[in-house]
Each structure stands twice: as C-alpha cells, then as structure tokens.
Image (cartoon, grey):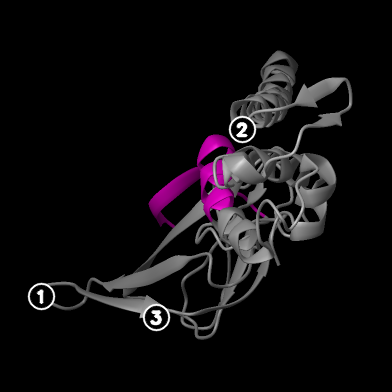
Amino acid sequence: MAYTDVTAVRLLSGLTTNEISDANITSLITYATAVLNSDINYNVNDELVEYIDAEKENKIDGSNTAFYLKEIKDGYQIGDYDNDGDVDTSDFYAYTIDTSTSPATRATVTVSTTDKALGKIVLSAAPSTTKNLYVSYSVAPFDENTPAQLIKQAATQLVSALAFTNIDAKKLQSFTIGKIRIIRQSDGFNLFMNQYHDTVYKINQRINRFEDNISQDW
C-alpha cells in the first residue's frame, strides 16, 4: 500500500497520460513517500527496551515476547521506517546483545506482529535473561498505514508537484485548476509544492499544539 495512487494524483493535478505515464507517477510516489516521511517523522535508533511503567514492564525473562517502545505515546504511532508507504513488521531493526559472552555478541531478532497505536511489538522468540534488546523504528504523527487523510493529501500534493518536473513541456496543454490557470511547468510545480508545504505545516502544528496541551496539563 502507498500513501497515494495514480488516480488521486491525476485527479488533483489534471495531468493526463499524454503528459506523464502511469509508470512515471508510480515512481514519483515511491520517491515522494520517503520525502514526506523525512518531513513529518523522526527515527529512533538503537532504543534500549526496558521498564516503562506497570503496564509496560518489558520483562526479559526468557518467556516474554511482547515489548513496548518508549517513544510511541501521546498520540504518536509507529511510522513507516522503510519508506514503502505502509507500516508492518519490516519497519523495525531489532537485535539483542548477549552480555554473558566476551566480547558481547549481537543477534538480530524477528518482529512477528505489531500494534502501531500502542507501540507494541511481539517477537518470534523470547530473549533470554542474559540479553539486552534494542530496537530502531520510526515515530509518526498519524496513522501511516491506512493512511490518515492529511498524510494522503500531502503525498498527493507532493507527487503532483514533482509530476510537473517530469513532463515534456511541449506536451503540456493550458488548463485551469480551481482559479489557477496552468500554462507552464513551473506554474503547476509551484502551486502543488506550496499546497504540500501548507499541509506539512498543518501536520506539524497539530503535533506542536498537542505537546503544548500536554505540558500545560502538567
């Protein structure tokens, strides 16, 4: 799954197959996904999984396989770490360090299931008591797997902007989008890039307002 699709991009941009192919739009969607993720998400690298609270004890006892991530809280969700437009078990780099050996040894572990909103991961096998567990992942402001409407909107706007840099200018026909008349590649690019930046700003402002409310509660 991706944040947007060819149909949505064509509907927003007004571009036809005469101006840009479906294959080129699909390639732009892949690129735009990584750009959008970098603008709204942040990555957590090598987080040591340890006790958080009474609900999220994160016991490493040789039998427990369910663990919680520290940064998934206050409305944040697990994000698209590998930039493929969805959130699944491939969006983690998890490993253990066995402290009983000298030198300590690292081994990757497999995440079998996840709860994106709770920040919960379930491993395919329980780490032993001599091991520390580390996880790298991405933190997102909204659901990126469905995706949330603002995520889809931003992705569609960015791909539409990039599409105008990918067309043969000789094939571009003059047309109107809303109240804006598009007669040059730069017109289309600027229109949709400005819309994209506005949407990203809304996403980030919503995060900031939420964090302000949390701090005021304290």
Q: Residue furthest front?
A: 170
Q: Point out the frontmost of discs 3 and 2.
A: 2
Question: Which badge, 3 or 2, comes first in the chain's sequence?
Answer: 3
> Quadrant of the rendered structure where residue 106 is?
bottom left
Q: At label 2, which amino acid type do we have? A: Gln
Q: Which residues are magenta?
A: 31-54
**Front one among 45 and 33:** 33
**From mark 3 to mark 1, how far is it between C-alphas?**
17 Å
Q: Secondary structure at mark 2?
A: helix
Which residue lies at the image location 50% right of the left edge and 86% below the top edge?
125
Q: Which residue is mark 2?
A: 185
Q: At label 3, which amino acid type do we have? A: Ser
**From mark 2 to mark 1, how far is it between C-alphas?**
61 Å
Question: Which badge, 2 or 1, comes first in the chain's sequence?
Answer: 1
Q: Secondary structure at mark 3?
A: loop
Q: Secondary structure at mark 1?
A: loop
Where is residue 100? Give x, y as percent: 21, 76
Where is residue 95? Give x, y as percent: 37, 71
Question: Which badge, 3 or 1, comes first in the chain's sequence?
Answer: 1
- Label 3–label 1 contact, CB within 8 A: no
- The C terminus, quarter of image: top right
Where is residue 122? Give x, y as percent: 60, 74
Which residue lies at the image location 64% right of the left edge and 40% below the top edge?
158
Q: Which residue is mark 1?
A: 102
- Label 2 environment density (alpha carbons within 10 Å; few <14, some 14–19, many ≥20): some
Q: Point out the frontmost of discs 2 and 1.
A: 2
Q: Which residue is mark 3?
A: 128
- The N terminus, quarter of image: bottom right
Q: Is residue 3 magenta?
A: no
